[in-house]
Image (spheres, rainbow, N blue to C red):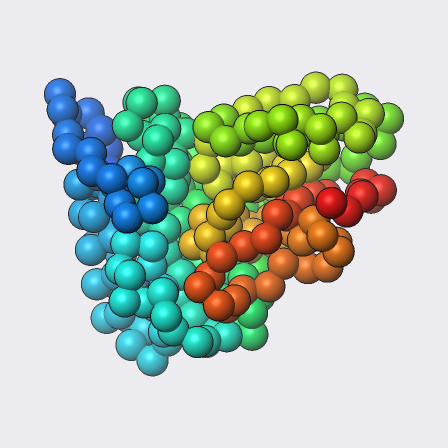
Amino acid sequence: MNYENLTQTMRRLALEAGDKIMEIYKADDFDVRAKSDDSPVTEADEAADALISAGLRAAFPEIALITEEQADTHDLDVRDFLIVDPLDGTKEFVQRRGDFTVNIALVENGVPTRGVVYAPAKNRLFYTDASGQSVEETGDFDKHTPGATTAIQVSDPDSGALMVVASKSHRDQATDDYINRYSVKDSKSAGSSLKFCLVATGEADFYPRLGRTMEWDTAAGHAVLTGAGGKVLRLDDLEPLVYGKPGFANPFFVATAPGIDLSPV
């Protein structure tokens, strides 16, 4: 794999998809439909998916592609693949809260090794560079010329005063019960895969998820967090979260900086 080419392609496609999404986001109205699992989907999801899928298939025809919006990709049995959530945080998008992201990742042997997370309404862009180090880019986000980047790194947690980030739309009593096991200084809420990025930048120490997610929801954020020195662990046994599982469904997990004495669920 040419990681330099991959990084450039994923970054460009995420930015182009972000432009499409923001065109629809800024419109007076847009259609919202319910999928078979009752989750919402909009024309922005579908437009971004079409753009990203076409770009990835043209650039990397030899690699399997899994994407949330194409059900015929959900039955593949693969360990190496590209995986896409073209608009993570559709509820945040529909409610015009801004916490939505474009997510593209490469999974190799069940491990997300490269990824990009772009939050177009927040003007935040995170990705792994060709070496696997995670960076945050600033500037005008030119499609073909990256702006200034800063390497990001997870926190050195103080176990007596932890900062936690949790889901804005899916926080529940089980999540609060788990958080209450720890000495938490403060907590914040965020939508979509931004939660992984807040741990990756050290803005939070850990992010527990006691609820349903799919691999396309987490792979890009997982890659960014790994490239910043963090890890994502299953909550049942605290083993690393792996990818390519049947149906691409995740168990409960925690995304974390090293050094926290975690307990399983």
Q: Nearer the viewer, residue 72 or 185?
A: 72
Could you tell whether 138 is left or right of 144 in the image? right
Residue at the (49%, 57%) spot, across then down: 249
Up/down of 195 relative to 162, above or below: below
What is the quadrant of the C terminus in the image? top right
Res 181 quadrant in image: top right
The answer to whether residue 126 is visible is: no
Residue 188 in the image, given as x and y percentages of width and height: 60, 22
Residue at the (67%, 53%) spot, across then down: 234
Residue 229 in the image, given as x and y percentages of width and height: 69, 50
Q: Nearer the viewer, residue 50 or 144?
A: 50
What is the quadrant of the N terminus in the image? bottom left
Up/down of 201 relative to 3, above or below: above
Could you tell whether 81 is left or right of 224 in the image? left
Res 156 quadrant in image: top right
The answer to whether residue 218 is visible is: yes
Res 183 quadrant in image: top right
Residue 29 in the image, given as x and y percentages of width and height: 14, 24
Q: How many marks?
A: 0
Could you tell whether 169 is left or right of 48 in the image? right
Could you tell whether 210 is left or right of 75 in the image? right
Residue at the (45%, 37%) spot, across then down: 192
Residue 129 in the image, given as x and y percentages of width and height: 51, 57
Residue at the (58%, 35%) spot, across then down: 198
